[in-house]
């Protein structure tokens, strides 16, 4: 068993850009996440579409080799947090009831320092992804960090509650992924951080208005 600090967490996407899931025979649907530790990266599973640990959390885990559709990858099973508190396995299992979901009562869940770290890491990831989609290769790390601070400031605009921030960083993710659609964002050569945030604002409003202004047609 290894102990390490989580450096990054992101949704594992399928070929259509959707959050990838896996449903074992006779079992419950699981969501896949790409988890990065200092010396390795692999896939972990969760019962819900949000991961139970965050960037900066120290955890104990096992890593095993797995293969899917001819591609080999590391599969992580996080056993406990770094303080030795047990976490029930969330690997896909069909012969036993689903494990208890991770509780938000974990002491670091809404820690401002932890949420700040997650928000900045997420912002950096979104900037890098946006530049990859736009084909912008002539940028340096200082520039990426500078742009990421713009995303970060918007993500933490309402404070450091993780649930509130998560709606904003997912809105930015959706805005960034939208840039690949033809004519969606206008002049891709001159797109700015504000353009992404304007789109993210619309996505965030759609989330906030669920149950109030959405009608079936």
Image (tube, helix red, strand yellow):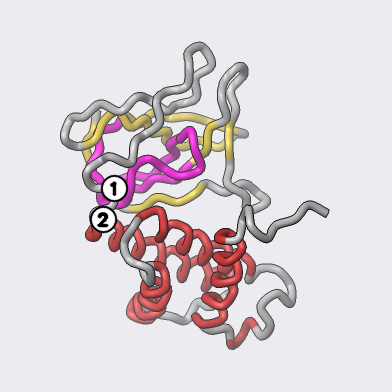
Residue 56 magenta: yes
Q: Where is 184 relative to 25, above or below?
A: below
At 53% across and 63% down in the image, what residue appears? Answer: 171
Rendering coords of residue 9 (x, y %)? 40, 50
According to the picture, the residue beneath numbered tag 2 turns out to be 114
Q: Is residue 217 left or right of residue 169?
A: right
Rendering coords of residue 144 (x, y %)? 39, 76
Rendering coords of residue 152 (x, y %)? 37, 71
Rendering coords of residue 14 (x, y %)? 62, 46
| Mark 1 element type | loop
Q: Of discs 2 and 1, which sits in the foreground?
A: 1
Q: Characterize the local packing of mark 1: few (<14), some (14-19) or many (20 or more) Cα atoms within 10 angstroms.
A: some
Q: Is residue 205 left or right of residue 139?
A: right
At 41% across and 41% down in the image, what residue appears? Answer: 42
Q: Characterize the local packing of mark 2: few (<14), some (14-19) or many (20 or more) Cα atoms within 10 angstroms.
A: some
| Mark 2 element type | helix
Q: Is residue 148 left or right of residue 59?
A: right
According to the picture, the residue beneath numbered tag 1 turns out to be 109
Residue span colored magenta: 33-61
Considering only order in the chain, which callout, 1 or 2, is on the residue closer to the N terminus? 1
Q: Where is 106 relative to 125, above or below?
A: above
Residue 113 magenta: no
At 39% across and 25% down in the image, what residue appears? Answer: 100
Locate the N terminus by quadrant.
top left
Q: Which mark is residue 40?
A: none
Given contact means CB atoms under 8 Å apart, are the residues at marks 2 and 1 in contact? yes
């Amino acid at each position: 068993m290894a102990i390490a600090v989580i450096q990054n967490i992101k949704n594992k996407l399928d070929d259509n850009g959707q959050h990838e899931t896996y449903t074992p025979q006779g079992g419950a649907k699981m969501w896949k996440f790409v988890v990065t530790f200092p010396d390795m990266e692999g896939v972990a599973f969760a019962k819900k579409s949000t991961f139970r640990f965050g960037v900066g959390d120290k955890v104990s885990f096992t890593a095993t080799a797995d293969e899917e559709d001819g591609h080999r990858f590391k599969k992580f099973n996080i056993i406990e947090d770094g303080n030795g508190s047990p976490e029930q396995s969330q690997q896909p299992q069909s012969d036993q009831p689903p494990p208890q979901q991770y509780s938000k009562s974990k002491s670091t869940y809404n820690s401002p320092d932890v949420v700040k770290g997650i928000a900045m890491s997420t912002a950096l990831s979104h900037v890098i992804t946006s530049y990859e989609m736009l084909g912008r290769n002539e940028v340096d790390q200082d520039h990426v960090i500078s742009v990421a601070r713009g995303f970060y400031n918007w993500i933490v605009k309402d404070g450091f509650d993780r649930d509130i921030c998560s709606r904003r960083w997912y809105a930015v993710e959706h805005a960034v992924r939208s840039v690949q659609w033809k004519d969606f964002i206008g002049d891709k050569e001159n797109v700015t951080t504000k353009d992404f945030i304007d789109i993210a604002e619309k996505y965030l409003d759609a989330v906030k208005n669920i149950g109030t202004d959405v009608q079936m047609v």
